[in-house]
Amino acid sequence: MKLLLQLAGKQSKTLLLVMFLSMASALLTISVIAFIQYRLLNEHASFSQSLIQFFLLLIALLLTATIAQISLHKLGHQFVYKKRRRLVAQLINTDIEQIENIGDAKILASLNTDIRNITIAFVHLPELLYGIILSAVSMAYLAFLSIPLFSISLLMLSMTGLLGFWLINRISSHIRKVREYDDKLYQDYQTLIDGRKELSLNPARAKRYFKEEFNKNAAGYRDQVIGADILNGFAANLANTIVLALIGVNYALALGLGWSSFQVASSFALVILFIRMPLMAAIGALPAFVTANISMKKLASLSLNESDKLIDEKSASTLSFQQLTLQGVTYQYRSNNEEKPFQVGPIDLTITRGELIFIIGGNGSGKSTFARLLTGLYRPHSGEVNVDGSTIHANSWHLYRHYFSAVFSDFHLFQQITDGNGKNISNNEIDNWMGHLEMAHKVSHENGYLSDTRYSQGQRKRLALIMSIAEQRGCILLDEWAADQDPRFRKIFYTQLLPLLKERGITIIAITHDDKYFDCADRVLKMDNGKLSELNPTNSSQVREAITATENQR
C-alpha cells in the first residue's frame, strides 16, 4: 500500500528493525506453543528445569513484543508528525491562487480528516504487522507438523483471503465516497459559520439550507459509513467462522480419515486458536489502512508546492526598491462558459520609491486583482515585472513578495508583532505607533504579543497597519483601509499618518474612494474594467468625473 511504501522509503532501516523484532516475537510465540507441547507435557522432562525455561521464554517474548510495538508506534507517529509538518509547510509555500482554487473546505478536510485517518492507520499498524507475521510463522510450523492438514488449511484460508480481497474492494468504494462527503460536510460547516448572521435573520433560509444541503450530505455520509461497517463486520465474522471451521475439519480429517494423529490435530487446533485473535485484529485493521490510503491520495491531489522548506531569515531580509515597473502585465480569470473571461491588463506602470499613490475604481473593476498582482500574490499570465532594472523570474517570485506588506480588505489580524524576518521589534517602536494610531489605551503588548485582537473592524485595521509597518517593507499596500474609520481619524490617516510613512521612504499604494483627500496623493490611478489609467490629481474636474463614474459602479 502507498502508506507503507512511503514509510519504507523514508524510514527503511527502522522499519526493517521493527519487522525483525516482530518476526522474533512471532517465532517466540510459536516456540512457547511448541515448548508446552514437547516439554511441559513430556512426562520424562525435568519439571523444575522446564518451568524455569518456560518463564525465561515468556520473558523474552514479552520484551521482544513490547520493544517491537513501542518502536512501531514511535515510527508511525513520527511519520504522521513529519507528514503534518510537510503539509503545512507546503501550504505556506503554495501560491495563494492555487489555495483559492482548492478551496478552504478541502484544505481543512485534509488537515483534519486525512491526517487523522493516517494517524489511526498507524495506531493499528502493530496489530496488522504482528498478525501477518504471526500467521505466516504459524503456517510454517503447521506445515512442519503435517503437510496434508497444512494443505487443507492453506486452501481454506486462501479461499477466505480471495473473498476478503473482494470485500476490501467493496469497503474501499464506500470509504472513497465517505471521504468525498467529508469535503462536502466541511463546506457545509464553513457555510454555517460564515453565514451564521444571515441564517439567524432568515429562519426559512436556515431551514432550507439544513434540509437541502447539510442533511443531504450528512445522510450520504451515514449511508456510506454504514455500508462500509456492514461489510467490515461481515469480513471479520467470516474470518472467525472459517478459523473455527478449520479446527473441526482438521480433527475430522486427522481422526476420521487417519491423516494424522490426535496429538498433531490437537497441536493444529492450539496454534489456530492462538493466532485467531491476532489474525482477527489484523483483518480489523485493514479498513483503517484502506481509509489512510485514500487520504494519502487526497493529499496528493491537492497539488501543493512540492517544497516543504520554509524561507530562511537571510532570504527574507527587508527589501526596498528604487523603481518598480510592470510591463504589459495581464491576469485572466478562468471561465466555464463561452463568454470571454474577465481580464486585468495589460498594465504598464512605473512606481518610484516614496510615492504616495491612490487607486480608485468601481466594484468588479479589477482593483483587488491588481493589488494581488502588484504584491506578487498572483503571478501574471503575460508581461513582466522589473525591480531596479532586474526582471523577476519564476524562481525568484517568492523573494519579490518581500518588497511588500499589506492590509487587505479581508485581512487576518495576528496576535504577534514581528519584523520582516519574523523577529520581535522593540517595545518603544510598538508604543510609538500605538500612540500614532490611538490604540495605546485599548490594547497592551508583552514580548511582541498583543493582549487581545477582539475589537471593532476599524480598530482591528489600526492594529493590522501597525503589523504592516513593523515588517519594515519598502512598500505598503492598503485596501480600503480608511473605510471603517470615523471621519476624525480618517483625516488623521490622510494628513498625518501617510505623510509620516512617506517621510521614512516607504512607498504607499492605497485603494480608496475618499476624493476629499486626493490632493494628498502624488498620483491617482483609476481601474476600470481591468484597465489602469492615470488621472491628474490637480485636475479637479477630471477627478470629479472619475469619482462620479466610480460611484455609479459601486
Image (cartoon, grey):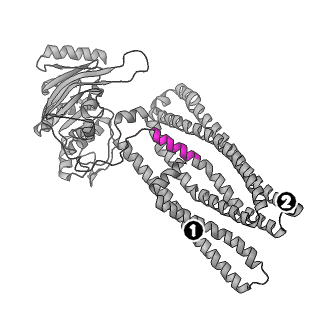
Taking 484 as reference, is 387 left or right? Answer: left
Q: Give the residue furthest to the front.
A: 147
* SS for dot 2: helix
The secondary structure making up most of the magenta span is: loop
Q: Nearer the viewer, residue 533 or 487?
A: 533
Residue at the (21%, 48%) spot, across then down: 430
Could you tell me how far apart the alpha carbons at marks 1 and 2 are, in whole angstroms?
38 Å
Identify the secondary structure beneath mark 1.
helix
Which is more N-terminal, label 2 or label 1? Answer: 1
| For residue 391, side relative to residue 250 (left or right) | left
Residue shown at the point (55%, 65%) measured from the top left: 20
Q: Determine if residue 545 is in view.
A: yes
Can you say whether 86 is above or below 62 in the image?
above
Residue visible at 53% across and 36% down in the picture? 185
Q: Give, as a three-letter code, the residue at label 2.
A: Leu
Tag shown at residue 66: 1
**Span of residues in magenta:** 290-319
Foreground of the two, 74 or 103: 74
- The residue where tag 2 is placed is 253
Q: Where in the figure is residue 115, as x and y percent of width and height?
A: 49, 48
Near mark 1 (Cα within 10 A), the count class, few <14, some 14-19 or many ≥20, is some
Residue type (three-letter) at the residue carrying disc 1: Thr
Q: Which quadrant of the view contains residue 280?
A: bottom right
Q: Residues within 10 Å of mark 2 (few under 14, many from 20)?
A: some
User: Is residue 303 rendered to the left or right of residue 502?
Assistant: right
Quarter holding the C terminus? top left
Give residue 501's position: percent from left, percent from top. 15, 38
Residue 3 x, y percent position in the rendering: 52, 49
Q: Are marks 1 and 2 in contact (CB under 8 Å)?
A: no
Most extreme residue toward the right, as rendered?
Answer: 256
Vertically, is 157 above or below 454?
A: below
Spot occupied by residue 255 in the image (x, y as percentages of width and height)? 87, 64
